[in-house]
């Protein structure tokens, strides 16, 4: 089910691969998107490149704190090593909001090997850090940024969506539908560990089959 309203979405680390890909697609779908960065200048540069690609001024920019303050839906798309520090930096701005966390706890250089942190899920650890005042939803771990960035091409995969708040998951599934993908309810935030682990399998599959973006499909669903 797509969202019927125009939503405000802030992307922390919006200058990166996943962040730019999501910004591009959500802005193209008509949402009000702001890309954030540690550097407002870097965000402005990414923003102007995205707007050039979109051929309109649909995307805005700011520091991570500025964009987080301005939107009820905040996306976290930074490397695992920066995940907790980035959340800590905007923590006071997240109360009552949905935080969509795309983090995969890869441990370079062996990124094709599952190496989940102690306790399991990197995203569940953020829900634990923030408490129930913030609805953390895990999504996009198994979607190649490379594919998201190619606006003209459909992305051929499903998106596993985990979170303790079912209504927040539903909102995120609507946003996923808006960019032409199918989001699937995949249970509570603890289940994010499975999605995070799957990414290393996909990286391994990409290397073995020499493809840029293997993805996953859930079969057997009639009314997901
Ligand atoms: N790449 C993929 O295909 C893919 C797919 C699914 C999920 N993921 C996951 O999604 C997340 C983002 O992936 P990505 O490929 O977009 O990452 P990325 O391009 O390497 O980095 C994203 C942004 O994070 C910020 N950043 C980098 N180092 C930082 C640090 N030390 N402290 C604070 N911010 C820092 C940078 O923004 P500023 O310099 O502008 O602040 C950067 O542009 C990761 O957790 C990744 O595992 C990636």
Image: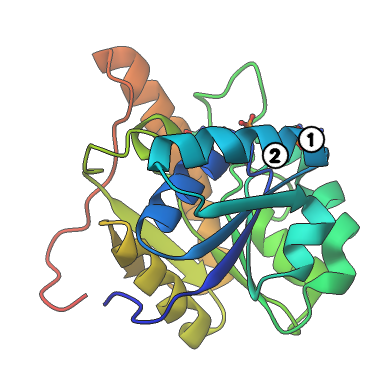
* Quarter placement of the N terminus: bottom left
Query: Ligand 1 within 8 A of label 1's CB?
Result: no
Location of residue 188 in the rendering, given as x and y in whole percent from the top left corner: 52, 74
Location of residue 127 in the rendering, given as x and y in whole percent from the top left corner: 71, 69
Question: At numbered mark 1, what does the secondary structure look like: helix, strand or loop?
Answer: helix
Contact, mark 2 vs mark 1 (Cβ under 8 Å):
yes
Which quadrant of the view contains residue 9?
A: bottom right
Q: Residue at x 30, y 65 (%)?
A: 177
User: How far is disc 2 from disc 1 in space, using C-alphas?
Assistant: 5 Å
* Residue 65 in view here: yes
Location of residue 104 in the rendering, given as x and y in whole percent from the top left corner: 59, 42
Q: Nearer the viewer, residue 15 or 182?
A: 15
The label number, if any, that marks residue 120 in the structure image: none
Q: Is residue 73 above or below residue 25?
A: below
Question: At numbered mark 2, what does the secondary structure look like: helix, strand or loop?
Answer: helix
Q: Nearer the viewer, residue 15 or 89?
A: 15
| Residue corresponding to mark 2 | 44
The crowding category of the residue bearing disc 1, from other C-alpha atoms within 10 Å (few below 14, some 14 to 19, many at least 20), is: some
Answer left or right for 81 relative to 14.
right
Answer left or right for 82 relative to 99.
right
Answer left or right for 162 relative to 75.
left
What color scheme is it? rainbow
């Amino acid at each position: 089910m797509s969202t019927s309203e125009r939503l405000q979405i802030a992307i922390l680390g919006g200058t990166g691969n996943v962040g730019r890909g999501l910004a591009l697609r959500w802005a193209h779908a008509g949402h009000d998107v702001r890309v954030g960065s540690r550097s407002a200048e870097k965000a402005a540069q990414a923003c102007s490149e995205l707007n050039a690609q979109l051929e309109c001024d649909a995307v805005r920019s700011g520091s991570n704190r500025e964009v987080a303050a301005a939107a009820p839906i905040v996306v976290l798309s930074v490397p695992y090593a920066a995940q907790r520090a980035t959340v800590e930096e905007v923590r006071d701005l997240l109360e009552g909001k949905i935080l969509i966390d795309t983090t995969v706890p890869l441990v370079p250089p062996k990124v094709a090997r599952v190496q989940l942190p102690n306790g399991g899920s990197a995203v569940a650890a953020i829900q634990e850090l923030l408490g129930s005042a913030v609805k953390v939803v895990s999504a996009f771990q198994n979607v190649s940024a490379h594919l998201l960035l190619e606006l003209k091409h459909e992305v051929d995969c499903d998106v596993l969506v985990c979170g303790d708040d079912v209504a927040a998951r539903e909102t995120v599934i609507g946003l996923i539908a808006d960019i032409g993908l199918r989001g699937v309810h995949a249970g509570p935030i603890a289940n994010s560990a499975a999605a995070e682990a799957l990414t290393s399998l996909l990286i391994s599959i990409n290397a073995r089959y020499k493809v840029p973006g293997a993805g996953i499909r859930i079969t057997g669903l009639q009314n997901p």
